[in-house]
Amino acid sequence: MRIFRGENYFRNGLPICVNRVEESFDTSMHFHDFWEMTYIAEGQGTHHSGDEIMPVSKGNLFMVPLGVSHVFRPMSLNSKEPLIVYNFLVDVKELKKFIHSFPGGNELESLLNCKEFKRYHDNSGKYYDLFQQMHYEFSADLPGKEARLYNGLMELLLFFYSSESRTYNESTQTAAYIQKVLAIMHADYHQPLRVKDLALVAGIGERQFQRIFYMQTNMTFKQYLQGIRMNHACRLLMQTDRKVTDIANSVGYHDIPYFNKLFKEKTGMSPREYRNSIRE
């Protein structure tokens, strides 16, 4: 069985690697000497670990600890339906240092004691955006790259930890409806979304919706929606030459002065300053 070694992935003293891979039948069963988090970005296939085979599809996340043997396979040889995955790889020793150096991070160490892979699902689409962004940050090699990658790493660790340990007082059905609401927000963030309409989707009153929404996201509805829009605006400013007015409209803001004001509140810079700073 093959072993994938971190020395082949980590470069220039950075103990993190983020790649995007089209899985094939050529990859053999393997294990690695690093910690891996994988996101199924496109297509369908299967995940093999030991004698266990399970179907995988877009939105599945995997946490693969040190030494766990596994491999992903596409559903078929049809290249029109490739199985695309993002891999976030981290050196285990450096991961432990990072967790212990972060305020409150010691609580997350239980994740590193896991001896088998874990499977989760991204109901909202939020972590697709995160993996995509982290892949861009890793590949673009822009100023602040290392800080952004570690920020993304902590966000993923908190997601896994919350998935393992968090319990809610609300019913499972209500929590599922909130996840449906988050999926709508990530898909239709450019539309004029309103609390009362999404509360109806969840089947609860507006006040209860606001309370449950904050409990599950640690943000108000308005803050969460603004965060989605600003993240997309930042990505468009980085990756395209579209005009600021066009970008503002595409993420749901038709009042350009308000968009500029809000963008500066969130990033500390105007949209043009942000674009210039990452291209210097």
Image (tube, rainbow, N blue to C red):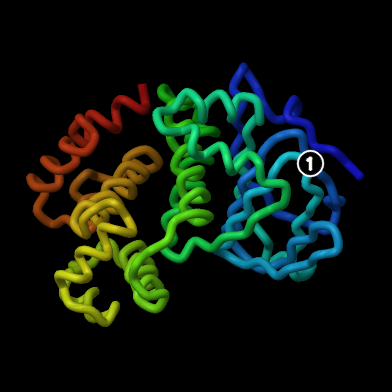
At x 21%, y 56%, the residue is: 220
| Mark 1 lies on residue | 67
Q: Position of residue 2 (x, y in %)?
A: 88, 41
Residue 200 occupies which quadrant of the picture?
bottom left
Q: Nearer the viewer, residue 121 or 130?
A: 121
At x 17%, y 35%, the residue is: 264
Asked if residue 246 can be seen in this view, the reply is no
Asked if residue 226 can be seen in this view, the reply is yes
Q: Position of residue 162 (x, y in %)?
A: 46, 52
Give the left or right position of residue 237, taking residue 160 as reference. left
Q: Vertically, is 161 above or below 208?
A: above
Residue 39 occupies which quadrant of the picture?
bottom right
Residue located farthest toward the right when viewing the structure as drawn: 1
Q: Vertically, is 55 above or below 86?
A: below
Q: Nearer the viewer, residue 93 or 55?
A: 93
Near mark 1 (Cα within 10 A), the count class, few <14, some 14-19 or many ≥20, is some
Q: Quadrant of the C terminus?
A: top left
Q: Secondary structure at mark 1?
A: loop
Q: Amino acid at mark 1?
A: Gly
Q: Vertically, is 73 above or below 172?
A: above
Q: Position of residue 206 (x, y in %)?
A: 16, 73
**How many numbered marks have been drawn onto this rendered protein structure?**
1
Q: Nearer the viewer, residue 108 or 86?
A: 108
At x 83%, y 51%, the residue is: 27
Q: Position of residue 138 (x, y in %)?
A: 53, 33
Q: Vertically, is 37 above or below 180?
A: above
At x 25%, y 57%, the residue is: 225
Give the left or right position of residue 83, taking residue 32 as reference. left
Give the left or right position of residue 192, taking residue 217 as reference. left
Residue located farthest toward the front when viewing the structure as drawn: 169
